[in-house]
Amino acid sequence: MKKTIQIVLDTDGWILEALAKKCYQELRKSGEKYETTLKVGLGDPGYDIYIHFIYLSAQIVPNSINIMYVTHIDRYHKAFRLLRLSRKNAFSVTMSTSTKKLVERYTGLKNTIVQIPESLHFKSVNNNKKITFGIFSNLYPDKRKNDQAISDFISLADQFHPHIHAIIMGSGFSDILKQHTSLSYEYYNDEFNVKNYKKNLNRCDYILYFGKDEGAISILDAATLDIPIIAIAQGYHKDIHLPKYSKLCSSSEEMLQTIKNICTSNSKDTDYLEWGELLDIILKGKNIKKPSFFRYFFIPFVKNEFSIESQVNIAKIKKIITAD
């Protein structure tokens, strides 16, 4: 027997209307399982499942499954509202893992599912391709090119295998590369050839330089070819025009953190969870617990990275002070 669903939208003409309509269209595709309607305003009685856009105005319908779409919780009164609804056995759906964790900190329960959003207007493009980093220099016995930082970079690239590829041109890298068998890389240790050098530069997404001296020719060349660079802020690196997405760093540690941030973002592989799949998960675990009443007293002490409570209070104080 089909379950009946009503999507309840507080008001139209906002981004939540588009999200609610997307929810409606996805559930309509599951016509053999669900009979779905969309309502602006208050929900109608008699449905098995209600999906409320947005949680602040949600009116929980007794004896039905209620799901609230929870966006950012930045004020105490929103947290109180969230708890009140959760105590009526409502599930939460969030757009981010950060908000999911916050809801769970407020409620003390695991009644929340993340639905990482996908674009409303454009088809998904698979940008999860390998990032190619290039290092073009020789290594020397005095280690002035920062051999240890290069080794640390290759260790980092190993961690993100197979999302990272490295192109290395220059002498002295053999011992470092022997330590990293899983790295996807190309190593060119033959006689310098300008044609091959330029070809390999253009294959890179970023050119790296960890050494500290007057500046690197490869960085100058990359900048000329408009290839983004990540390098130490030194010598003429600070004087030349740099391509978009370049970064000059104060230390090799900052360079490695920058590279790690890029790799972390690129290696994320999150699939959009359609509403039909999401409901399947909720219906399997529909017997949920309600938060304790005492959770209300913990609200001011919950760590909330979205909170604007202090800014609002300061604004109120300033308004009172400056009032005529």
Image (spheres, rainbow, N blue to C red):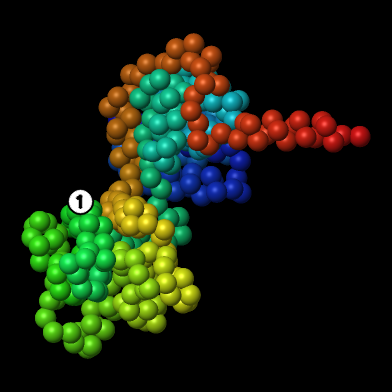
Q: Secondary structure at mark 1?
A: helix
x and y percentages locating residue 225 in the rendered image: 37, 81
Q: Residue at x 44, y 21 (%)?
A: 107
x and y percentages locating residue 63 in the rendered image: 43, 18
User: Vertically, is 133 above or below 224?
Assistant: above
Residue 188 visible in the snapshot:
yes
| Left or right, residue 8 beside residue 259 | right
| Left or right, residue 74 beside residue 201 | right
Which of 194/160 is in front? 194
What amino acid is found at the position of numbered circle 1 in the picture?
Gln
User: Residue most toward the front?
Assistant: 142
Q: Quadrant of the C terminus?
A: top right
Q: Residues within 10 Å of mark 1 (few under 14, many from 20)?
A: some
Q: Residue at x 27, y 78 (%)?
A: 201
x and y percentages locating residue 136 in the rendered image: 24, 74
Q: Which residue is mark 1?
A: 159
x and y percentages locating residue 161 in the rendered image: 18, 55
Q: Quadrant of the N terminus?
A: top left
